[in-house]
Image (tube, grey):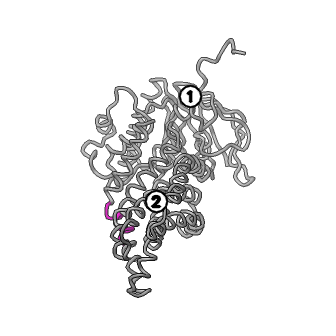
Amino acid sequence: MAAAFRAMLQRDLLLAWRRRGDALLPVLYAVMVATLFPFALGPEHTLLARISGGVVLVTVLLSMLLSLDAVFRGDLEDGALEYLVLAPQPLALLVAARMLAYWLVTALPLIAVAPLLAYMLGLEGPAQPVLLLALLLATPLLALIGSVLTALTVGTRRSGMLLALMLLPLAVPIVIFAAGAVGAAQQGLPWVAPVAWLAAALALAVVLAPLACATALRIALDS
Amino acid sequence: MMNAFPDPQPAPIDVRGLVYERRDERVFGPLDFTVEAGTIALVEGDNGSGKTTLLRVIAGLLRASAGEARVFGSAPGSDEARAGTASLGHLLGLKGDLTPRENLHLGMGLYGCKSGEDPDAMLCRVGLEGFGDEPVRTLSAGQKKRTALARLALLPARLWLLDEPYANLDRHGIALVNHLLALHAAAGGSALVTSHGAVSFHQGVACTIRLTP
């Protein structure tokens, strides 16, 4: 079982490395979206600093949404998805490896560039590490919830738009807790509680999302 | 209570009254057949007669409408059934950005490997010597098929579900498929093979299942 997890993770990281230019696109997108805010709102420092945490969070969320739609599409188109479903391994385990690879390839570069975006918008002091912590918890949570929805919409036409419409309402609590933690840290208030909520939700999602995703994929292929 | 006379080896495939309907329209059935260990069964039928659908039902991807299919005595798609089965469909499931060698290693990682087999030797046997490190997307359709056949022959599965294995292959490729099937049957394996009838296939076919639309 560990060998299958490793083989799957290795496959996805190798595929991402062969197409490493693609991994840059969400990062460039995030940088551009974040750059638009000072142009739209004016260069007033206090305003930008106050909204910076939320802007960075929403930007990262939207960037992830761009590539989430394609998580299972390639495997569906070349038939690899059927071979994964038929493999004598727990499908949830293979899905978990897929999601880990997706998070490493897509979310990690975004998290790496997030401090730069936050600094550009004037986020300073102790709120910076809190933002990083919130992103480290919020991005895998989004990827896991998104993977279930992607599995449900795999094979449908215009699945990208459908995915966005289904995922964004579910992302609301994640954004509230993550932005709440950053906002509290900016005002010098305790910020541990919202971060703990995110961590609890992530612990739940790590266990449940691969199972739900595996079931959704089986349903998607049964037609 | 324990069964005093347990069936020592359930048949690889046992089908009783199997019917599949799509939107209340019958695709095939009712079918009754058994594929014993060490034998090859051929599914014949015209385009659209439900050959692929039958294979997908037995693989466990589709749910039968009526009747029962047993794979090694278990329900299709169950852990026991999947552990003994390998399939080859119209879509080969090869990753185009990976090389044949990397694709074989991936298949072995997911399905395990027959003891005493080596992926590089297998690539030579299917006639892909020198192509082991080219990305699969640059290979021809026939070479892709050969890569998929090499992966199939490496897996430890005792039952093969092959959907049109002769498509895209030249004369040597067709002989290769027959050779692999003969070796597989000689080692006690069994196979369910679909064909639209264009390729003559005689050796060692134990039963033929004829599907009519």
Q: Position of residue B126 (x, y in %)?
A: 34, 39
Amino acid of disc 1: Ala
Left or right of B129, for residue B78: right
How many circles with numbers are drawn on the protein?
A: 2
- Callout 1: SS: strand
Few, some or many residues within 10 Å of mark 1 (<14, 14–19, 20+): few
Left/right of residue A10 with respect to residue A208 in the rendered view = left
Task: Answer left or right for B203 relative to A117.
Answer: right
Tell me which amino acid carries mark 2: Thr
Q: Which x, y percent locates residue A150?
A: 54, 59
State the SS at label 2.
helix
Rendered residue at 59%/69% (across/down): A165
Q: Which mark is residue A139?
A: 2
Asked whether the viewer can see residue B136, the reply is no
Label disc, if present, on residue B206 of the rendered structure: 1
Q: Which residue is at a point 45% across and 24% down the rendered structure image? A: B186
Q: Which residues are magenta?
A: A20-28
Disc 1 chain ID: B
**Quadrant showing the N terminus of chain A:** top left
Q: Using the image as rendered, state which of residue A122 and residue B139 is in the foreground.
A: A122
In the image, B172 versus A65, the foreground residue is A65
Disc 2 and disc 1: Cα gap in Å?
55 Å
Question: Which numbered dot is residue A177?
Answer: none
Do the residues indicated by labels 2 and 1 lie within the same chain of the protein?
A: no
Tag nearer the camera, 2 or 1 = 2
Badge 2: residue crowd in 10 Å (few <14, some 14–19, many ≥20) = many
At x 52%, y 39%, the residue is: A90
Name which quarter of the figure residue A158 lies in: bottom right
- Would residue A198 be seen by someone viewing this image from the given angle? yes
Magenta residues, dominant SS class:
helix
Residue at the far top: name it. Answer: B4
